[in-house]
């Protein structure tokens, strides 16, 4: 699969580095550095992009500027991309209204588009747009990418005698590499401390998603939502091995 990654800073550069290190060797990844400054309204997208782009099946946008979204249809037309993934790890990079517009523009071009919010909510068939709402998509290119990168999927093995985590295999990493980092830090931990430690490892990686509180995430942040996704994946697997403590209320003293 041929991939064009659009980057504008450290956030995107780290994602591309992880994809190159752990994605299939058959993937060919080219990178385009988006303009650092764009006007509030872009009337002529062709003024801000090269005349040609290398052919691509999939565009990955890790740009940290909302104006780049207005360039993507023109880029897709130039390189023949069949699908686009735009990371929404900060709502200022792709506000809700602009995300809907972009999906509509690309749909009219017969180009599939996913706008996962946060990026690590992407699976092989859908992605998150709020804490409770998900959008389904149909795209072999996006699904092929999401087989390896997106919503963290770890296979955790627990030693039943010691109740410690003996292995943590990464079936699907976060695009940034955070899930792989968390998995390495879980080995040898008691199941009773694994969830708290996983949350700390996620923050220490560090996750670069926004810390702005959002109404559609119950006034929580995308960084915290990202952490919930990896911790929830681990929690379900270790639940049978945890010690459950019950507290019986006593009598109040006079």
Image (cartoon, rainbow, N blue to C red):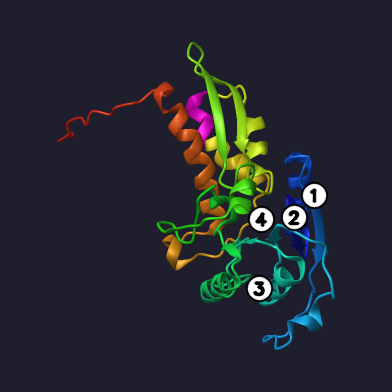
Q: Residues within 10 Å of mark 3 (few under 14, many from 20)?
A: some
1 or 3: tag closer to the N-terminus = 1
1 or 4: tag closer to the N-terminus = 1
- The residue lying furthest to the right in this view is 51
The numbered dot on residue 164 is none
Q: Which residue appears at 54% of the width and 73% of the height?
A: 104
The residue range painted magenta reads 190-195
How far, Cα to Cα, is label 1 from label 4? 25 Å
Look at the image and say whether residue 205 sits in the magenta stretch.
no
Label 3: state its secondary structure: helix
The picture places residue 146, in percent across and down from the top left corner, at: 60, 47
Q: List the residue tagged with mark 2.
A: 3
How far, Cα to Cα, is label 2 from label 1? 6 Å
Residue 33 shown left or right of residue 138 in the figure? right
Instruction: Specify the principal SS of the magenta part.
Output: helix
Camera sees residue 186: no
The picture places residue 133, in percent across and down from the top left corner, at: 41, 59
Q: List the residue tagged with mark 3.
A: 69
- Which mark is in front, 1 or 3? 1
Mark 2 and 1 residues: CB-CB less than 8 Å, in contact?
Answer: yes
How far, Cα to Cα, is label 3 from label 2? 17 Å
Mark 1 and 4 residues: CB-CB less than 8 Å, in contact?
Answer: no
Frontmost residue, 171 versus 204: 171
């Amino acid at each position: 699969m041929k991939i064009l990654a659009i980057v504008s800073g450290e956030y995107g550069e780290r994602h591309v580095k992880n994809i190159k290190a752990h994605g299939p060797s058959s993937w060919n990844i080219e990178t385009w550095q988006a303009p650092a400054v764009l006007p509030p309204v872009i009337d002529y997208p062709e003024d801000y992009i090269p005349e040609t782009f290398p052919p691509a099946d999939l565009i990955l946008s890790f740009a940290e500027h909302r104006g780049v979204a207005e360039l993507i249809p023109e880029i897709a037309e130039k390189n023949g991309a069949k699908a686009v993934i735009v990371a929404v790890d900060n709502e200022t990079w792709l506000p809700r209204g602009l995300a809907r517009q972009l999906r509509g523009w690309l749909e009219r071009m017969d180009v599939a588009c996913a706008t996962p919010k946060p990026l690590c909510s992407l699976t092989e068939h859908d992605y998150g747009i709020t804490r409770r709402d998900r959008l389904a998509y149909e795209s072999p290119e996006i699904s092929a990418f999401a087989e390896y990168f997106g919503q963290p999927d770890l296979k955790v093995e627990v030693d039943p005698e010691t109740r410690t985590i003996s292995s943590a295999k990464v079936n699907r990493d976060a695009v940034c590499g955070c899930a792989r980092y968390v998995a390495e830090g879980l080995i040898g931990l008691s199941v009773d401390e694994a969830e708290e430690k996983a949350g700390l490892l996620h923050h220490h990686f560090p996750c670069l998603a926004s810390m702005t509180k959002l109404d559609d995430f119950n006034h929580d942040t995308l960084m915290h939502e990202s952490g919930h996704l990896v911790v929830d994946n681990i929690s379900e697997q270790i639940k049978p091995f945890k010690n459950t403590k019950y507290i019986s209320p006593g009598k109040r003293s006079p």
